[in-house]
Amino acid sequence: MGFARNTWRALGPWGRALVRGAILLLVLHWAVARWVIVRSTSMFATLFPGDVALVERWPLWTGLHRGDIVVFQDPLKDDRAHWRRPMLVKRLVGMPGDTILLREGKLFVNGERVGPFPGETHRYLVRLAKGASADPVLTEAGLPLHFGVVEGGAIELPLNEALAGRIRERTAARSVGPMSRHAIAARYLFPYSPNFRWSTNDYGPFHVPAANDTVRLDLYTLPLYDRTIGRYEGHDLHVDGDHMLVDGRPTDRYVIRMDQYFVLGDARDNSSDSRFWGCVPADHLIGRTSLVLFSWDASRSGPRHGQWPRWVGQR
């Protein structure tokens, strides 16, 4: 005790102030707020690549809500320690215990239509004037330069009617119109089983696991829960013929230990989300973002035009 007191005194007033400041920053980082830089277009046009978003930590304790924009650790990078996993940003659409259904791209939660959310985008085809560059269109949309591939004087972009209207009015695009929804097949989607013939546009019904849910465990349902049991909740899961073994014991039931959440990107046709890799376990959540502090447009080497700070999500 005396050694610690003498060491503290030896730091001097400036040293002690630095230590107190570092401790305060660590507490704020852990319990109050941090920040994240958006790097993909999966949340376009709610969030843009280069957005610096404030991450509120307290909703992990006070409670999240359907429609929140959440930041979490990549569930597929479970070969790394938690602190080394990349952070992802998506829209929380399914709370623990909810039933998720997508029909023709429309979202239903517990049987009720949800959305579209502000900023949600889908596939549009922009036809350019002969010999015209796509850069003015991309600039107007707020997308990085060289986004997408121009083929035959046309470019496919994630847009909504508001953005499409701006492009029609302010650029030399010959036409701007929605495209038919592109459905990715079930073999590329969670739970990767021929028993669940879903697509990105027609997905579910899917029950979002909640803590203390008792689920049936057999060869049919195994693809839904094998990652939860073996990866997220740390049990030894094996199949012996038609029987499931959890930690060496045969069982046809499993009690979920941890709440999970279903997330989608606002760029619904340009997002890898829960449709592709399943739910986000509660211990992967980092926080909620509702405020963009600043935005840097790397392709143009300058700040993105707009007012900062900018509110997103639910207020």
Image (cartoon, rainbow, N blue to C red):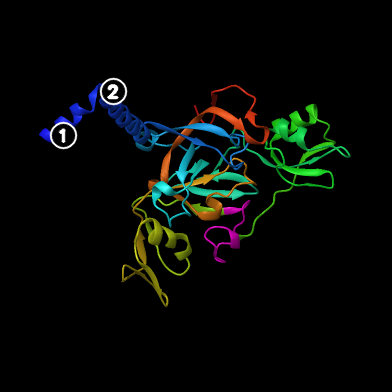
Query: Which secondary structure is most common in the magenta stretch?
Result: loop
Residue 197: in magenta span: yes
Q: Which residue extends farthest right?
A: 130
Q: Is residue 111 visible?
A: no
Classify residue 212 as left or right of residue 275.
Answer: left
Q: How many marks?
A: 2
Classify residue 86 as left or right of residue 169.
Answer: left
Numbered circle sitting on residue 4: 1
Q: Nearer the viewer, residue 29 or 228?
A: 29
x and y percent of residue 137 in the render? Answer: 76, 34
Residue sitting at x 19%, y 29%? 8
Q: Which residue extends farthest bottom?
A: 241
Sequence order check: which comes first, mark 2 or mark 1?
A: 1
The kind of secondary structure element at disc 2 is helix
Numbered circle sitting on residue 14: 2
User: Which stretch appears magenta?
Assistant: 187-203
x and y percent of residue 24 in the render? Answer: 31, 29
Q: Residues within 10 Å of mark 1 (few under 14, many from 20)?
A: few
Q: Quadrant of the N terminus?
A: top left
Q: Residues within 10 Å of mark 2 (few under 14, many from 20)?
A: few
User: Amino acid under label 2?
Assistant: Trp
User: Amino acid under label 1?
Assistant: Ala
Classify residue 178 as left or right of residue 211.
Answer: right
Q: Is residue 222 visible?
A: yes
x and y percent of residue 307 in the render? Answer: 60, 21
Q: Nearer the viewer, residue 284 or 106?
A: 284
Q: Quadrant of residue 23?
A: top left
The kind of secondary structure element at disc 1 is helix
Residue sitting at x 72%, y 32%? 139
Numbered circle sitting on residue 229: none
x and y percent of residue 147 in the render? Answer: 70, 42
